[in-house]
Image (cartoon, rainbow, N blue to C red):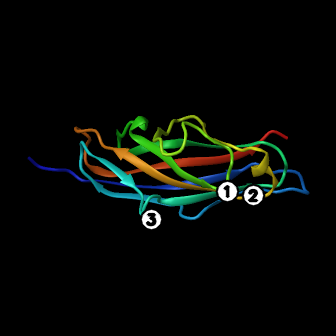
Amino acid sequence: MRKHAILMVFCFTCLLAAGHAYAAISMDVDQNMLDFRAVNPGSTTVLADKGVYHNIITLTSTNNKIWYFKAHLVRPFTSGLNTIPNENFKWECVSIGQGRGIVTNNINVPTPFTSTPSLIYTSTDTDNTGTPVAMMMRYHLTIPKNQISGAYDAVIRLTMNEIL
């Protein structure tokens, strides 16, 4: 039986919602590329190149208002006309550092990316006064058994916003 390898590479894009002139809201991604390297059809790969996590997304706000961190796939994993289903690609938050907010579906629970913005984190009062929330993230990708080989890439959009 011949095995096919699939290479997945994608980049994060970041959007920031601006606060008023005297406060700040910011997002920093320490590594904006995820490379799943060669993956065999029918297998799952967990991307955690730094041990238990792959990258850190640091979110900070001094606006003293609840903020929300969301993500969605702008474009799913594609190679030509071939697509890997969105539900096969998952994010997992393994730590929130000094954060005290709520992680959707809790810590250490893989959650599928979707094509519409999905809530990952909701801040609490202590997160809204400049305390950085350093989210350690890892990623899971399951390749369907009959997936066609190719160089697949996807685009994720991360957003941090608050109600002013």
Could you tell whether 88 is left or right of 127 in the image? left
Q: Name which quarter of the figure residue 30 lies in.
A: bottom right
Could you tell whether 56 is left or right of 126 in the image? left
Residue situated in front as seen by the camera: 157 or 100: 100
Residue situated in front as seen by the camera: 46 or 127: 127
Amino acid carrying label 1: it is: Gln
Amino acid carrying label 3: it is: Lys
Q: Which residue is mark 1?
A: 98
- Figure check: 38 above or below 80: below
Residue 131, label in figure: 2
Residue at image location 42% in from the left, 35% down from the top: 87
| Quadrant showing the C terminus | top right
SS label for mark 2: loop
Mark 3 neighbour density, 10 Å: few (under 14) some (14–19) many (20 or more):
few
SS label for mark 3: loop
Q: Nearer the viewer, mark 3 or mark 1?
A: 1
Q: Give percent across and percent down for residue 12.
A: 55, 54
Q: Which residue is mark 3?
A: 50
Q: Name which quarter of the figure residue 71 lies in.
A: top right
Q: Give percent across and percent down for residue 88.
A: 38, 39
Residue at image location 42% in from the left, 42% down from the top: 89
